[in-house]
Amino acid sequence: MATAQSYDLAGGDNGDAIVFLHGMRVTRRMWQPQMEALASEFRLIAMDLPGHGALRSEPFHVEQAVEQIAQVVDQAANGRALIVGISLGGYVVVEFGARYPQKAAGLVIASACVEPRGWYNVPYKLLSAVMSNVPESWLSRLNRALFLAAYGEERAQPLVAPGFYMRGGAASIREIMGREFGPKLAAYPGPVLLLNGEMDLGFRIHEKRFLALTQQGQLAVIPRAFHIVNIDQPQLFSQAVRRFGRSLPW
């Protein structure tokens, strides 16, 4: 169950609200750059998904995650918010928009523009098996080293400081694999921003198809960014979310 201990707040109490959903195996802390950059204009809510962070003891199921987001939107955002998600969080955003369109002023779907079906699932089945069976301490040390090498000590902190949740990440991969998200995206009637890193080629495969499915969609590609686009290019990512948020009818 989502509680005040499973999400962070920033910004004023009465502004238009943005809810942020993190990627696989990390936590709500990954949104620290955006929580700092956008707090002067919006009410910001970064929440943990089941199997991760404060909710690590809860099994990850997409439907459960959607219900918990709805609870947080009601508790902390007066029943309506812009919902932003990256990677795993991006797919959950699509499900939320289809299930609760009245609670979503808009959707930002980052690094999640590929249908996770067919051949695409093969490496992720292997990754899920590794994350389920290799000792978490080993995987955590490896992930920490990779993120520190990629981003340096300061930029990597939102990813590495809270630790990694490999079992929850593995469960989330299994939940996402084989689902079809295009029809869910098409069902959402409101504004959608597809936001991808220029060099995140594996998760841009279907971006044109996804864009065509949206009823009020736009696509933005952030230069010199890979998969974790909000950390790769935090300023450009925050600017894109700010512009989109300002454009919404709320």
Image: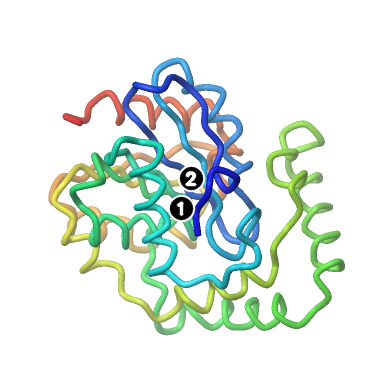
Left or right of 229, for residue 114: left
User: From the image, which quarter does the C terminus lie in?
Assistant: top left
Q: Are the two marked residues, 1 and 2, in contact with CB atoms closer than 8 angstroms?
A: yes
Q: Quadrant of residue 134?
A: bottom right
Q: Nearer the viewer, mark 1 or mark 2?
A: 1
Where residue 124 appears, as percent x and y from the top left, is 57, 76
Q: Residue at position x 27%, y 39% from top? A: 80
Which residue lies under the disc numbered 2?
197
User: Mark 1 to mark 2: distance in Å?
Assistant: 7 Å
> SS for tag 2?
strand
> Which mark, by number, is residue 209?
none
Residue appearing at x 78%, y 53% in the figure: 146
Question: Horizontal and vertical percent for residue 19?
Answer: 42, 41
Q: Nearer the viewer, residue 120 or 106?
A: 106
Total of numbered circles in the picture? 2
Question: Between disc 1 and disc 2, whose residue precedes?
Answer: 1
**Front residue of this view, candidates 49 and 189:** 49
Q: Which residue is mark 1?
A: 111
> How far across and how far down the image is residue 196, in percent?
43, 46
Q: Residues within 10 Å of mark 1 (few under 14, many from 20)?
A: many
**SS of the residue under disc 1:** loop
Image x and y of residue 202, in percent: 49, 62
Which residue is rendered at x = 81% and y = 45% of the image? 149
> Left or right of 1: which side holds 242?
left
Badge 2: residue crowd in 10 Å (few <14, some 14–19, many ≥20): many
Depicted 126 relative to depicted 215: above or below: below
> Quick check: 56 left or right of 134?
left
The amino acid marked with disc number 1 is: Ser
**Type of the residue with mark 2:** Gly
